[in-house]
Structures are given as C-alpha cells and as structure tokens.
Amino acid sequence: MRILVVYYSLTAHTLKMARAVVKGVERVDGVEPVLRRVRELEMMQEKIDKSENLKRIQEEQRDIPECTLDDLREADGIIFGSPTRYGNMTAQMKALFDSTAQLWLKGELEGKPAGVFTSTASSHGGQETTLFTMMAPIIHLGMIVVGVPYSVKELLHTEGRGGTPYGPSTIAGPQGELEPAPEDLRIAEALGERVAKVTLRLRGSGKRE
Ligand SMILES: Cc1cc2nc3c(=O)[nH]c(=O)nc-3n(C[C@H](O)[C@H](O)[C@H](O)COP(=O)(O)O)c2cc1C
C-alpha cells in the first residue's frame, strides 16, 4: 500500500507538516509513504530567485520529486498539504488538481482515502476554509475524506496554534517567523497514521472499494 503525501511549500512550514505526516504513515506496518512536492509556477520563480531565503528553502526540497499523475494513480491513499492563499489553497496545488481530468474521466482516484493539511500566517487567516476548499476537488474525484478525530488529544485546545478536525494546520506568523508547534506536528502525524490505517482497511484486501 502506498500513501502519497503531496504538498506545496514556499517558506517550509507546510514542508515540516508534510514530514510529520510521513512520520505518522511510517508507524503503520504494511504501508509505504511517498513524499512528493507540487511543481512551482514559472511566475513565482523570479521572486524566489531574488530571495536568498526562498532559494535556500527551494534548494532544500530539490531531492523531493515533483508529483506526477502516475504518483496519484499509483497511490492507495493521498494526503494533500497546501498553505493558504486568501483563505484558499495555493494556485500551485490547484494546478495539480486541475491536471487530473484524465484520472477523473476514468475514475482512477475513486475510493482512495484522502486527507488535507494547511498553514496560514495568522490564527484566523483561513485554515478551515483552505481545508474545506481542498476537499471539494477531492470529493469530485471520488476520494473518501478522512479527518482528525477528537480522540487525538492535542485537538481540543484554546491556545494560539493549529489543529482542526478537518485536518492538521499550523500558524507560520506574518513573516514566517514561527515554527509548527509540537502539537501541530503530532496532529499531522495522527492524520498520516489514520489515513494509512483507513487505507489498509479499505483497500488492504486487494479489492478496490
Ligand atoms: C498571496 C498570498 C496570500 C496569502 N493569504 C493568506 C491568508 O488569507 N491568510 C493567512 O493567514 N495567510 C495568508 N498568506 C500567508 C501564507 O499562508 C503563509 O506564508 C504560509 O502559510 C506559509 O506556509 P509555507 O511556509 O509552507 O509556504 C498568504 C500569502 C500569500 C503569498
């Protein structure tokens, strides 16, 4: 069983969450995590090239392959991570979804468990809206949305950090100066583990749901 963790990240917060999701997947015997990044847009490259910080972060991700349609096709479960852009997913992640028409036509993603995670600059900058809007194409593609249950104890909190039942999240800060809280990372691990377990239950028999 392959669990694809596919993310976009400009300043590395979503990347750190993606690595935590992978850690959670790794806890489950019989599944293999596959980490992939979403292709950068040409219009962003000029901005990245002008910033030593952004160039360094892009370089750090060089060894992570770009996600292809075959990666989506071959995955048994998929977890998508995108920072927010005005309360919605990034154009980079949307471009990946928009490239899946041939998979949709053949129903190739149908029945695959899927989860979502995000990062925002501020506490109320659109974590839930980003997670929900990512779920729309997931549902159109016939995947089965998996959230985070409240038995994950870090979820029930009132302090300024991430963590929602719709998916893990973190707060990057207005200048990207914050690190994901340990609780944010544990919730991300919990989602990875849960999607892996649900995938095994649904698809482990070799039968397609
Ligand atoms: C065009 C643009 C729009 C953004 N919109 C929001 C927003 O609506 N709410 C918010 O909290 N942060 C917003 N941000 C901040 C990013 O979400 C934040 O930098 C990101 O979560 C960091 O994730 P990363 O380190 O993985 O790139 C925006 C950033 C950009 C560039």
Image: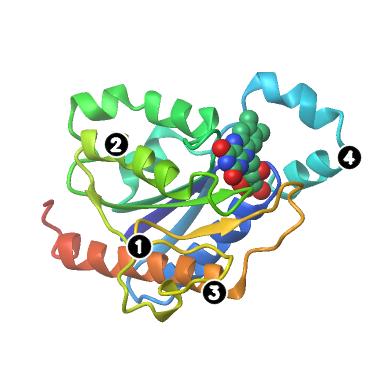
Percent position of residue 174, x then y: 72, 47
Q: Residues within 10 Å of mark 2 (few under 14, many from 20)?
A: few
**Which sits earlier in the primary sequence, circle 3 or circle 4?**
4
- Residue 9 seen: no
Given this view, does label 4 or label 1 mark the residue nearer the observer? 1
> Separation of disc 4 and disc 1 at Cα?
36 Å
**Which sits earlier in the primary sequence, circle 4 or circle 1?**
4
> Separation of disc 1 and disc 2 at Cα?
16 Å
Percent position of residue 70, x then y: 38, 37
- Disc number placed over residue 136 in the picture, else none: 2
Q: Label 3: which residue?
A: 183
Secondary structure found at label 4: helix
Given this view, does label 1 or label 2 mark the residue nearer the observer? 1
**Which sits earlier in the primary sequence, circle 1 or circle 3?**
1
**Which sits earlier in the primary sequence, circle 1 or circle 2?**
2
Is residue 85 depicted above or below 62 in this figure?
Answer: above
Is residue 194 depicted above or below 75 in this figure?
Answer: below
Q: Residues within 10 Å of mark 3 (few under 14, many from 20)?
A: some
